Amino acid sequence: MRTLRLCLPLTASAALFLAGCSSSSNDPYALHSTPEKIEWNSDSLDIYPNDVRQDPSRYDGARVAWAGIIRSSDAKEFGDGLLKIHSVFEHRYFDWEQDQVHGKVRYGLSPRGEGLFETDWVVRKIDPDANAEKAEAFGAPGKMAIVYGVPDQVDADGVVHLQYRFAQIIDKKNYDTHVFDYGRFGEPFTYLK
């Protein structure tokens, strides 16, 4: 995994070279919080959903970080000010970079990925007005998510379930799937715009 992270600056340089002169810059993905930093240092970026589908027992206890687009979120309130949210994501390849475009951070997800994955996350209500409806709006379909977790099962339809560890939710306006088409690390990529 450390070798993979060392290659990211080289990938960023190549992407910038291919894009030519523009009003944007590519930087490594910036971690948003202390919990995300903890996960980042413990999770693998190069284990993918299809790896887990092909041999689930091989990845018992493996900690992964996957990017995807939220397809659905269903929240329920339960005791002690807690909310449980079940979310389904469409996996997308992510280059773990962020672009600064006209002073705003944007992420370039690939239009391709490796199918569906899901997780159940539990959050504590901090705002007394928080409810299931607001939790579902926070995890609304179409938003980008970076989910850190441990694969624990694959259902009959091939959906990989992750034991939740952390998630970073990113608004629709802050990502694009029409800039680069790429796959797993080391595979060729195509500049689309």
Image (cartoon, rainbow, N blue to C red):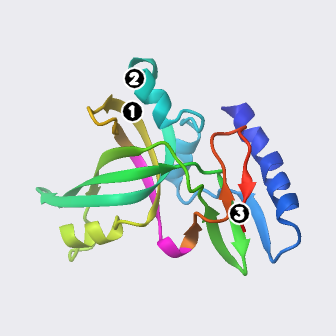
Q: Which residue is mark 1?
A: 151
**Cα–Cα span, label 2 and label 3:** 34 Å
Nearest-to-viewer mark from 1 and 2? 2
Residue 111 location, quadrant: bottom right
Counting from the top left corner in percent of width and height, residue 135 is at 27, 67
Identity of the amino acid at label 1?
Pro
Instruction: Tell me the magenta residue range.
Output: 165-173
Compared across the picture, whether 127 is left or right of 59 comes to left
Does 167 lie within the magenta span? yes
Task: Please identify the quarter of the rendering in which residue 140 is found.
Answer: bottom left
Report which residue position mark 2 lands on.
56
| Residue hosting label 3 | 192
Question: In the orientation shown, which residue stands out farthest toward the bottom?
Answer: 102
Q: Residue at x 71, y 79 (%)?
A: 103
Mark 1 vs 2, N-terminal side:
2
Between 10 and 127, the one lying in front of the other is: 10
Which is more N-terminal, label 3 or label 2?
2
Give the x, y percent position of residue 51.
Answer: 49, 28
The mark lying in front, picked from 3 and 1, is 3
At mark 1, the secondary structure is strand
> Mark 2: which secondary structure?
helix
Percent from the top left, x then y, of residue 108?
63, 61
Query: Residue at point 66% right, 50% down?
Result: 95
**Corner quadrant of residue 155:** top left
Q: CA distance from mark 1 to mark 2?
A: 8 Å
Q: How far separated are the C-alphas under marks 3 and 1? A: 32 Å
Identity of the amino acid at label 2?
Pro
**Residue 62 visible at all:** no
Q: Are marks 1 and 2 in contact (CB under 8 Å)?
A: yes
Q: Is residue 33 toward the left or the right of residue 150 in the image?
A: right
Instruction: Give the image location of residue 6, x and y in percent.
Output: 77, 39
